[in-house]
Structure formats: C-alpha cells, structure tokens
C-alpha cells in the first residue's frame, strides 16, 4: 500500500488484475491548477501529450455561467506518464506557470488547510488593554 498521497505501493493499471477496475485513487490522473482563463482542453492536451497518451482533459467550469474555474483534470493512458509529468518541476501553459499535482479521489485527499471548524477572532489582542 502507498502512502497517504498515493505514492508508491504497486498501483494498478487499466485492464490489469482487479476485474478491469480503474487504478486505485485515480493514479492515472493529474490536477492542473492556476490556469489562465484562455486555457482550453486543446491547449492542455497539446502540452501534456509530449509526456504520453492523453485519454481525456476536462477544464472545470462554473455550473451557472459556464466560465472556466481555473483548474482542470487530465487523464493519461499509462500511470507511468504521471510520473514523467511530475518529474518536471515547472509547467507553463498559455504563458502562465501552472500547479500540477497527482489527482486524489474525492474523500481521500488530505483535509484542506483552509477549511476549519475554528471560529474567527483567534489571534486577537491579548494584552488586556482595550485601546
């Protein structure tokens, strides 16, 4: 079994073993964030096809307006292609450096540092004077 982030641990390929199920934890998928509003599925496919066969590209859009939300998911034919993509520290698409990460299945990703059950007002002035 791999670590919390899905690294290591004999990940399954499409068509192998497990009754034709998808690789564990979307091992063949990447998240691409910080996209330019002009970035299209075609420009993402063009960039990532240099690493291997791209199965699908989905730029996420606002349900109401249809405007791009600034991130996308790219699925590759081979899990090894994700390793090649991740080996490059810098990816520039449409003249903008983007954030590329291994995709995590919903409910499996680590909790966000931005979601908290804490109430506001922490870290206020504790020195006792009310000035």
Image: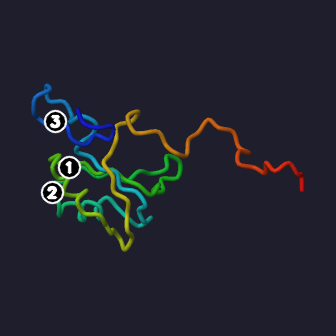
Q: Which corner quadrant holds the N terminus?
A: top left
State the separation of the CA atoms marked 1 and 2: 7 Å
Task: Categorize mark 1 by other alpha carbons within 10 Å: few (<14), some (14-19), many (20+).
Answer: many
- Say which label, 1 or 3, has the lower sequence index: 3
Query: What residue is shown with label 3?
Result: 12
State the separation of the CA atoms marked 3 and 2: 18 Å
Query: What residue is shown with label 2?
Result: 52
- Mark seen at residue 49: none
Q: Are marks 1 and 3 in contact (CB under 8 Å)?
A: no
Res 96 → quadrant: bottom left
Instruction: Give the vertical position of 18 relative to 72 (above or below).
Output: above
Q: Whole-percent x and y of residue 89?
A: 29, 64
* Viewer-side residue, 130 vs 86: 130
Q: Which corner quadrant holds the C terminus?
A: bottom right
Label 1 element class: strand
Relative horizontal placement of residue 110, taking residue 77 as reference (left or right): right
Number of marks present in the image shown: 3
Instruction: Give the vertical position of 128 relative to 17 (above or below).
Output: below
- Mark seen at residue 76: 1
Q: Are marks 1 and 2 in contact (CB under 8 Å)?
A: yes
Label 2 element class: loop
Q: Whole-percent x and y of residue 15?
A: 11, 35
| Residue drawn at point x = 30 percent, y = 48 percent | 102
- Say which label, 3 or 2, has the lower sequence index: 3
| Residue drawn at point x = 29 percent, y = 50 percent | 30
- Say which label, 1 or 2, has the lower sequence index: 2
| Residue drawn at point x = 48 percent, y = 56 percent | 67
Relative horizontal placement of residue 101, taking residue 2 as reference (left or right): right
> Which mark's residue is nearer the viewer, 3 or 2?
3
Res 12 → quadrant: top left
């Amino acid at each position: 079994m791999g670590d919390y982030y899905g690294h290591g641990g004999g990940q399954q390929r499409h068509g192998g073993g497990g009754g034709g199920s998808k690789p564990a934890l979307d091992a063949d998928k990447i998240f691409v964030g910080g996209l330019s509003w002009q970035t299209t599925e075609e420009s993402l496919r063009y960039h990532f096809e240099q690493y291997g066969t791209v199965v699908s590209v989905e730029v996420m859009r606002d349900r109401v307006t249809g405007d791009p939300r600034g991130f996308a998911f790219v699925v590759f034919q081979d899990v090894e292609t994700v390793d090649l993509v991740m080996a490059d520290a810098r990816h520039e698409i449409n003249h903008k450096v983007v954030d590329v990460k291994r995709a995590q299945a919903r409910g499996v990703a680590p909790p966000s540092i931005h979601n908290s059950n804490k109430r506001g007002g922490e870290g206020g002035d504790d020195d006792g004077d009310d000035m």
